[in-house]
């Protein structure tokens, strides 16, 4: 692979990132009530005004990260938008309960009234990501304290007592280790400890190791498959839920593990991340006929019961791009760069929308656009720009070191 | 249209119904723990043992209805299976709460332990349908009393106080008239009053009229569209939820209204049922390019946010067949029989599976099988046999009266 190809790739990714940022800066800001609209058509028109807390938190995080770490995005309008989003979240995201406890809403009206509260912890996760990153650019210590306090609440729900999430305790609802939970917590630990002193690192050290172990429990079937849901003891669960595979999620967990291994020089975790969390989901998840990654699969080859199982979604492709490029940058193994370019070719010939400069999110198995909006209840300013941002930075490093020719 | 064509159609439907009943009798009975498996592959193998309460109740209802009203299904094995299903439901479906109240579970383990409780009332609806119909074949008065008592609870949740459903009261969660609720209640009133004396009919009369009014509130946009969710005052709601159309649901409501109008000789409701609840969803919902009914649409032409919006599902086609054939049998208008045969041709060239004798449930927009199982978490022994049963009976009447040539 020549440097010229990597250069071209970087320039392409760089210009894609510019287009994507432009789209959201131009169309997503609610200048009346604060926060962000995320249900956006190709022309930027708002087709629904509901504000999804996951997506509010993610957009604040992404704006701040770009502002803080990339010179060309260190612009007042990005900082101001992030601050306005953070203010909206702090004002409206928490919902008080009769018990005196609180929970973050999943969805708010455009003026901040709670519409729905999920009985999971993901709204809180993205709230914490937003507050921590925002506090880094504003220097607001209260905000960082709030992020840390909410993190304590999350840890309590996950490791001590989940009843505060509001799910009734049912005899048939066996405790499950769902990939999403340790993944998100690991991501939050990496967020909260980045660039911090040893006191903060030590505070989260045991939690981080627990997260890694919980993620590794998803390697099943004698190391031949990553399963999305396993028992808390790390064994396979019965039925569809136990056999479910989510290749995009496994790949995302893979690059979280690579980041962990890189910090510690832990070659064993690096090897597992690549051989188990990247190669396996690619082998089972890549559609040999039409290209692209399936959304869900059943490890025994049954048809998944999720109606969208065979669709090609944008975000697994974003995660795959980050995973394979990071794996290549750490190992310099040429086959990992080849994988990256296979995913790259499919992704950039299928997902970008020339009209908006952003990406479509949902394709049929055959690669036809199935849902033609740019933003929706689950697609905001996050996976696409995070992927482009991560890949651009990795490519910068690779090209700066100039030892990439393979 | 000649009698010969209707005869052929009846014979085809009759043999389809026989095949479908055979499949479920053969493969779905859990002879160990009771109740029914519904996650069944094409070869009848059980790919997941969870028992979904909606589907347990529906299967009991359908078996009993066939046993009670069709000679060829008046067989001990069908009665025994229905009784075993009813016993499973009575033993396991209700979940007690800390408050002393109860709620029906949504999903149970194969041995009856509650896995999930929904914060809606549909599990209860299908429980009531099952108990009422089962009491009609067994003569069990306790069971009928239980159905009536649960019905009182449902009415209380819908019309007096919904807090028992367990949804937190949130300021942005405005009360909504969702088509499913008055439809289901109307269906239950028709079930509970069928063939009963005037005391029972009178008891539910006001509720029945309320249901019809609530359904009619879904006629919106100056009579040009049926919308799935409206405000309790009967006005359009903002955003995607307010613009949502579900053609299959509208068609199902249509034939519920036709049954109501037939009982009363109410020509105005009959006319509304046909022109609004059948013609409009057919006009907007039929895919002119590939045939078949879309699952969801947006009245303003935006792309729905449901990933499966363009898929062709079995049940809207079942409801459309019943709706147009019933409308034809009541009015003898030839265009309604033509519609029936348009839906019939698409349905029988796309959904039936020769291997199993049953139907696939989920096709892509283009009509390719997208999920290749026969039964799943939402597809049990209900829409297909109910459709075939209703159509066979209507065709019996049409052919017996012999005035069908148009």
Image (cartoon, coloured by chain):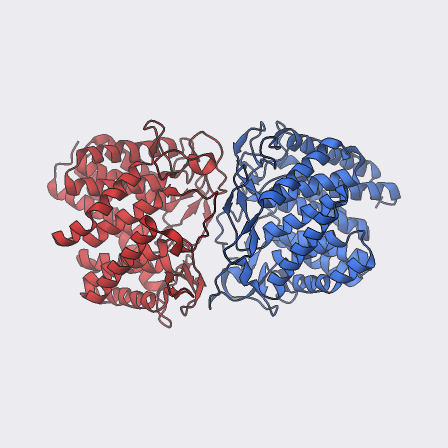
Chain colours: A blue, B red
Q: Looking at the image, is A95 positioned above or below residue A29? A: below
Q: Can residue A344 be seen in this view?
A: no
- Quadrant location of the N terminus of chain A in the rendered image: top right
Across and down, in percent, residue A391 comes to: 75, 42
* Residue A356 found in image quarter: top right
Q: How many marks?
A: 0
- Relative depth, front residue between B178 and A231: B178
Q: Tell which residue pokes out farthest to the bottom in this image.
A: B32
Across and down, in percent, residue A42 comes to: 58, 29
Across and down, in percent, residue A112 comes to: 55, 40
Q: Residue at x 52, y 32 (%)?
A: A47
Q: Is residue A190 visible?
A: yes
Q: Looking at the image, is A111 positioned above or below residue A259? A: above
Q: Is residue B366 left or right of residue A323?
A: left
Across and down, in percent, residue B217 comes to: 32, 36
Q: Residue at x 50, y 39 (%)?
A: B305
């Amino acid at each position: 692979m020549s440097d010229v190809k990597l250069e071209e790739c970087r320039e392409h990714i760089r210009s894609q990132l510019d287009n994507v940022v432009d789209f959201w800066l131009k169309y997503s800001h609610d200048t009346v009530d604060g926060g962000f609209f995320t249900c956006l058509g190709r022309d930027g028109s708002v087709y629904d005004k509901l504000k999804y807390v996951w997506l509010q938190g993610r957009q604040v995080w992404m704006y701040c990260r770009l502002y803080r770490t990339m010179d060309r995005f260190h612009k007042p309008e990005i900082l101001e938008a992030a601050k306005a989003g953070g203010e909206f979240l702090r004002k409206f995201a928490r919902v008080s309960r009769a018990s005196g406890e609180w929970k973050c809403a999943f969805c708010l009206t455009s003026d901040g009234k709670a519409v729905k509260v999920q009985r999971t912890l993901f709204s809180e996760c993205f709230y914490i990501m937003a507050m921590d990153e925002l506090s880094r650019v504003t220097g607001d210590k209260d905000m960082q304290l709030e992020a840390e306090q909410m993190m304590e609440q999350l840890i309590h729900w996950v490791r001590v007592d989940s009843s505060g999430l509001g799910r009734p305790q049912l005899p048939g609802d066996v405790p499950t280790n769902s990939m999403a939970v340790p993944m998100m917590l690991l991501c939050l630990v990496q967020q909260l400890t980045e660039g911090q002193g040893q006191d903060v690192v030590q505070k989260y050290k045991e939690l981080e190791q627990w997260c890694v172990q919980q993620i590794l429990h998803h390697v099943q079937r004698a190391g031949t498959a990553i399963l999305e849901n396993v028992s808390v003891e790390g064994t396979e669960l019965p039925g569809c839920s136990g056999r479910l595979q989510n290749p995009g999620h496994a790949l995302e967990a893979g690059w979280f593990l690579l980041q962990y291994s890189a910090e510690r020089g832990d070659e064993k975790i690096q090897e597992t991340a690549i051989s188990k969390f990247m190669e396996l989901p690619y082998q089972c998840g890549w559609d040999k006929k039409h290209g692209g990654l399936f959304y869900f699969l059943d490890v025994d080859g049954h048809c998944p019961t999720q109606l969208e199982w065979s669709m090609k979604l944008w975000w697994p492709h974003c995660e795959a791009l980050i995973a394979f490029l990071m794996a290549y940058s750490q190992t310099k193994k040429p086959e990992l760069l080849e994988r990256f370019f296979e995913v790259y070719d499919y992704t950039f010939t299928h997902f970008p929308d020339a009209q908006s400069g952003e990406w479509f999110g949902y394709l049929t198995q055959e690669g036809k656009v199935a849902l033609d909006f740019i933003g929706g209840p689950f697609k905001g300013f996050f996976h696409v720009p995070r992927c482009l941002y991560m890949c651009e930075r990795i490519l910068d490093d690779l090209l700066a070191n100039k030892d990439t020719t393979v």
